[in-house]
């Protein structure tokens, strides 16, 4: 392992795979998978589907973003779930880092659109995993139940190619557009995210912390 990759194998304030809760989850989720690629694939599906996607679970602090916190509450937004996947990978000595992009999401709930005043999600998070000598993007945000409700094509991951959002849903409607990649880093740039959210959304982001996303999704489906 070269020295450049070492930073992507260490615990960090949010990627706390040295926490027994995270280490145990990673060990159990990798199952009997042999080899780092197969382990990373198993971890991807475990994080994608065992932790529900919830944009209202966003807490922009070290404690709020810790992988161990996400496991304890059982839900998380895209950045929190990307952190958890990175932590699980590092726990098994698989180099992993966090990637960020601004995306236009065409499928959100009515209340979330009203609160955000935009369909652009700044600092969307994904995990970048080093496998077989290359960095591969993995996006574990949307759990399978959410995809089925919204008729989204679930994101699969095979450890060989990037797994990023599909531009269209199963009915051919626009789903996701990548507008800008913000780069990849060893840990989450919390202060930069707070600065962007404060400028682009609400002054204190309080409305983004209050809501029942599962209920909103069900209401949205009924009105389709």
Image (cartoon, grey):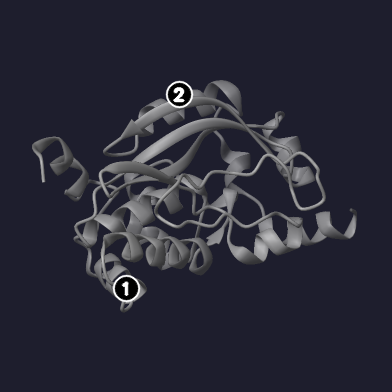
Could you tell which of marks 2 and 1 lies nearer the N-terminus? 1
Q: Residue 103 falls in which quadrant of the image?
A: top right
Determine the residue positioned at 43% across, 60% down.
Answer: 44
Above or below 165: residue 22? below
Determine the residue positioned at 50% across, 61% down.
Answer: 48
Determine the residue positioned at 22% across, 60% down.
Answer: 91
- Helix, strand or loop at label 2? It is helix
Determine the residue positioned at 32% across, 45% down.
Answer: 62
Furthest-right residue in this view: 223
Above or below 218: residue 33? below
Which residue does the numbered mark 2 point to in the structure image?
195
Instruction: Give neighbour class at mark 2: few <14, some 14-19, many 20+ (Cα, 10 Å).
Output: few
Above or below 6: residue 123? above
Which residue does the numbered mark 1 point to in the structure image?
33
- Helix, strand or loop at label 1? It is loop
The spot of residue 60 in percent (x, y) is 43, 41
Between 96 and 65, the one nearer to me in the picture? 96
The spot of residue 217 in percent (x, y) is 75, 57
The spot of residue 84 in percent (x, y) is 37, 56
Between 105 and 205, the one nearer to me in the picture? 105
Residue 146 left/right relative to 70: right
Per the rendering, the mark at residue 127 is none
The spot of residue 203 in percent (x, y) is 57, 26
Residue 198 left/right relative to 115: left
State which mark lies toward you, 2 or 1. 1
Above or below 66: residue 32? below
Between 44 and 1, the one nearer to me in the picture? 1
């Amino acid at each position: 392992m070269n020295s450049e990759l070492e930073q992507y194998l260490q615990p960090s304030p949010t990627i706390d795979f040295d926490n027994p809760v995270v280490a145990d989850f990673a060990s159990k989720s990798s199952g009997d998978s042999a080899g780092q690629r197969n382990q990373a694939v198993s971890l991807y599906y475990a994080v994608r589907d065992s932790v529900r996607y919830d944009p209202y679970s966003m807490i922009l602090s070290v404690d709020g973003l810790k992988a161990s916190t996400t496991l304890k509450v059982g839900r998380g937004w895209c950045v929190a779930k990307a952190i958890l996947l990175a932590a699980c990978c590092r726990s098994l000595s698989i180099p992993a880092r966090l990637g960020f992009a601004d995306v236009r999401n065409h499928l959100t709930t009515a209340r979330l659109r009203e609160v955000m005043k935009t369909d652009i999600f700044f600092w969307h998070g994904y995990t970048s995993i080093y496998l077989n000598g290359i960095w591969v993007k993995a996006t574990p945000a949307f759990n399978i139940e959410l995809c089925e409700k919204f008729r989204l094509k679930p994101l699969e991951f095979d450890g060989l190619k990037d797994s990023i959002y599909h531009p269209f849903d199963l009915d051919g409607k626009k789903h996701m557009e990548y507008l800008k990649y913000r780069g990849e880093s060893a840990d989450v740039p919390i202060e930069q995210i707070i600065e962007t959210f404060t400028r682009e959304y609400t002054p204190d982001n309080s409305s983004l912390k209050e809501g029942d996303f599962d209920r909103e999704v069900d209401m949205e489906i009924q009105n389709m």
